[in-house]
Amino acid sequence: MPKNKTDNFLKAIKKYAEANKTAMQGEVKQLKTERLKEAEQQAELDSGRLIQERLQKKLNEQTAMLAEKTQEGQRKLFIERSAMVDEIFKLSAERLVEFTSSGEYSAKLLNSAREIAELFGNNDCVLYVNERDLSNAEKIKACFKAGAEIRTDKTIKIGGIRGYCESMSIIADETLDSKLEAQREWFVENAALSVL
């Protein structure tokens, strides 16, 4: 009988071990399934994050490239617009130089001289003109009550008069050069040559 009891005891232990083994295998299988599912979810999140990062990087690169091309295009337009404005003002200066040989110009030159003379009053002054305008020197001097010395000025390319009264510390610029240049800013703002 002792053998039977021992056999029964061993059978019970074996049965208990088998039941535990089956339960453990089930738990291991369930744990494996859960861990695999967690790993798949984490992989999905990681791959989604990686895809999002790559898309954002690509978007940033494309945005930077577009901004660079836009800036380059604006720079080219600005250069072209500046060249157009320069050309327009060069042609205008040439036309004004042609105008300086007319009788109408001589009358305007003398009007400018009278305006400067009125400003300077009875004070001596120095008047600067283009070399072409020296032929009107005596008529210009006659507009001034006080002494007026006339000198040529190579910076006056087109024509007109620039006066300086030392005692009043005033410069009166009635040159066509300065008047034309003063129109440049107005022209750029109003000529519909805007850079987008």
Image (spheres, grey):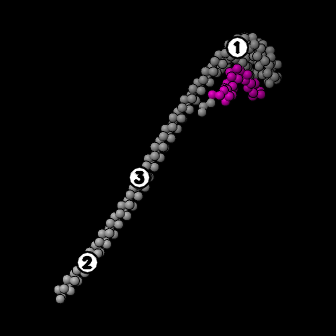
* Position of residue 61 measured from the top left corner of the image (x, y, whole percent): 47, 41
As helix, strand or loop, the secondary structure at mark 2 comes to helix
x, y percentage for residue 146? 81, 19
Q: For the point 20% across and 86% down, which residue is it? A: 5
The residue wearing badge 1 is: 99
Residue 171 x %, y %: 73, 26
Mark before the other along the chain sequence, 3 or 1: 3
Image quadrant holding the N terminus, namely: bottom left
Q: CA distance from mark 2 to mark 1?
A: 123 Å
Q: Residues within 10 Å of mark 3 (few under 14, many from 20)?
A: few
* Three-letter code for the amino acid on which mark 1 is drawn: Phe
Highlighted magenta segment, given as a residue range: 164-193
122 vs 42, left or right, is: right
The image shows residue 41, relative to residue 119, as above or below, that is below
Q: Is residue 55 above or below residue 112?
A: below
> Would residue 62 appear left or right of 77 to someone viewing this image?
left
Left or right? Give the position of 140 relative to 40: right
Q: Which residue is mark 3?
A: 47
- What amino acid is labelled 3 in the image? Ser
Q: Residue at the location (74% across, 14% down)?
A: 105
**Quadrant in the picture for residue 118:** top right
Circle nearer the viewer, 3 or 2: 2
Mark 1, secondary structure of its residue:
helix
For marks 3 and 2 on the same chain, the one whose residue lies earlier in the sequence? 2
Nearer to us of marks 3 and 1 is 3
Calculate the distance from the C-alpha at mark 3 to the C-alpha at mark 1.
77 Å
Local crowd size for mark 1, using a 10 Å CA cut-off: few (<14), some (14–19), many (≥20): some
Q: Are marks 2 and 1 in contact (CB under 8 Å)?
A: no
Q: What type is the residue that disc 2 sits on?
A: Lys
Please name the residue that numbered disc 2 is placed on.
15
